[in-house]
Image (cartoon, rainbow, N blue to C red):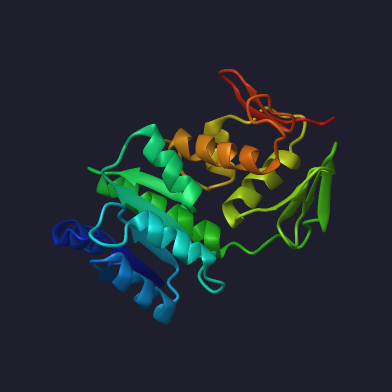
Amino acid sequence: MAEILVVDDEEAVARIIERALCREHHVRVCYSAVEALKVARRINPDLIILDIVMPGMSGLEACRELRRDPVLKSVPILFMTALSRVEDRVEGFEAGADDYLTKPFDIRELVLRVKAILRRARMEPPESRPLQITIGALTLDCQTHEVDTGEKKALLTPVEFDLLYHLMTHPDQILSSERLLREVWDYPSDTGSPDLVRMHIKNLRHKIEPNIRTPRFILTVSRHGYTIASE
């Protein structure tokens, strides 16, 4: 059973999530971000479901703290929050979230997203994966998760690495958000949000593009999806 840490200052919401997941997973509940950091360092959970707006330390601050922790930096984090503006989602993903679900939420969607996140986190890297991939001026180190553009280097999060790796191993294809959700994040149809793809593409561009307004490496094909530049 996976160890899931649920963090929400609203007890009723936290208990709803706990009841939805406790049949298949071991669920622990915390009502503050400060408490959650202490518990996370003690149990090293498989997934953290984290509210954003809480008294004292916010979920965003807690997420950033977790990403700085050498032991917990790769633990998947799912934000569960009432903040639904695009700006809020951007801030959440920039803080290091793997996924973002807004309240009120559908229990079935929550369960499916949790399953997809855990399944992806448990997948072993394929033995056939090369040591590095080079497309044009872009080189991705598959061991260190570092990307080199020829002008600068950047260390990618596990989610960013998976996305860029998939794009670079399909250099002649235009990949829709729906296809990326299915093939990179392992979400069943109609359960993942295109915002997830869009925000992680945005974060990747901030790390590798000389100018994010005129991308050189990750190109958007209007109404179709994304592709990696081969030259």
Taking the spot 24% from the left edge, 64% from the top edge, the residue there is 18
* Residue closest to the far top: 222
Left or right? Give the position of 184 relative to 210.
left
The vertical placement of 212 against 224, above or below, is below
The vertical placement of 172 against 12, above or below, is above
In depth, the one of 76 and 212 nearer the eye is 212
Position of the N terminus by quadrant: bottom left
The vertical placement of 150 against 158, above or below, is above
In depth, the one of 105 and 88 nearer the eye is 88
**Is there any visible trace of residue 211 in the rendered image?**
yes
Residue 31: give x, y in percent of width and height: 23, 66
Taking the spot 42% from the left edge, 64% from the top edge, the residue there is 47
Residue 203: give x, y in percent of width and height: 57, 42
**Is there any visible trace of residue 191 in the rendered image?**
no
Residue 130: give x, y in percent of width and height: 82, 56
* Residue closest to the far left: 12
Left or right? Give the position of 66 relative to 105.
right
* Residue closest to the far bottom: 42
Residue 219: give x, y in percent of width and height: 68, 27
Position of the C terminus by quadrant: top right
